[in-house]
Image (spheres, rainbow, N blue to C red):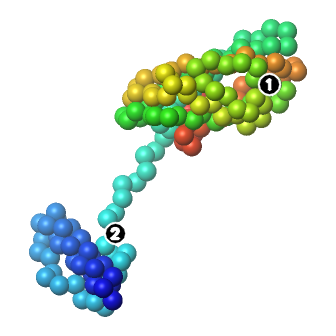
């Protein structure tokens, strides 16, 4: 019963605060029959629309090798820390070495994680990473990228 009483108090405080912000008068008590824990919830802002990142991918090929350059730009207003970039490496490509990130696995659905000096991407800033890979004829680009679970736009 004590928990229910506390929840009612929270609901009453939320109603009073909402009324104060609206400039209206608030009821002095919240009837027990109409109060519920859900009524005490504070509304949340809608999630931001659009991608918070942009990825530019370029590739240079020769014989059975390729070099990929990836530029990740933070298009949000907040820093991105401890970033994780995920992308599907096209079939037949196998990463042999990389720079400014750690890549795993070396083929298939790849995850790139920033190294110590490349873990923060400031608002509006960009970092460059890349890798060398072998290929069996297919030199295509990844079809999509996600940064910390958020899809990135491609340029």
Q: Of label 1 and label 2, which has the lower sequence position?
A: 2
Mark 2 secondary-structure assignment: loop
Compared across the picture, whether 68 is left or right of 64 comes to: left
Q: Establish if 66 lies above or below 77.
A: above
How many numbered marks have been drawn onto this rendered protein structure?
2
Q: Position of residue 59 (x, y in %)?
A: 70, 16
Category of crowding for the residue at label 2, using alpha-carbon neighbours closer than 10 angstroms: few (below 14), some (14–19), many (at least 20): few
Category of crowding for the residue at label 1, using alpha-carbon neighbours closer than 10 angstroms: few (below 14), some (14–19), many (at least 20): many
Give the camera-side residue of 1 and 111: 1
Give the camera-side residue of 124 and 114: 114
Compared across the picture, whether 49 is left or right of 42 comes to: right
Compared across the picture, whether 155 is left or right of 119 comes to: right
Give residue 94's mark: 1
Give the camera-side residue of 24 and 136: 136
Compared across the picture, whether 127 is left or right of 133 comes to: left
Q: Residue at x 67, y 19 (%)?
A: 98
Q: Residue at x 76, y 14 (%)?
A: 66
The residue identified by callout 2 is 41
Q: Nearer the viewer, mark 1 or mark 2?
A: 1
Q: Quadrant of residue 110?
A: top right
Measure how far apart labels 1 and 2 are at the Cα level: 49 Å
Query: In the displayed image of the protein, which residue is found farthest to the top?
Result: 62
Q: Position of residue 62 (x, y in %)?
A: 80, 8
Query: In the displayed image of the protein, which residue is found farthest to the right?
Result: 136
Q: Establish if 2 lies above or below 113.
A: below
Mark 1 secondary-structure assignment: strand
């Amino acid at each position: 019963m004590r928990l229910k009483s506390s929840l009612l108090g929270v609901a009453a405080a939320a109603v009073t605060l909402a009324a104060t912000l609206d400039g209206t008068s608030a009821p002095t008590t919240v009837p027990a029959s109409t109060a519920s824990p859900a009524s005490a919830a504070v509304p949340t802002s809608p999630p931001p629309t659009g991608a918070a990142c942009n990825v530019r991918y370029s590739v240079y090929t020769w014989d059975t090798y390729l070099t990929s350059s990836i530029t990740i730009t933070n298009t949000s207003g907040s820093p991105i820390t401890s970033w994780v970039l995920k992308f599907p490496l096209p079939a037949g490509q196998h990463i042999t070495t990389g720079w400014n990130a750690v890549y795993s696995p070396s083929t298939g659905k790849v995850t790139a994680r920033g190294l110590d000096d490349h873990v923060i991407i400031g608002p509006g800033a960009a970092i460059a990473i890349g890798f060398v890979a072998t290929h069996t004829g297919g030199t295509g680009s990844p079809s999509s990228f996600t940064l910390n679970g958020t899809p990135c736009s491609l340029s």
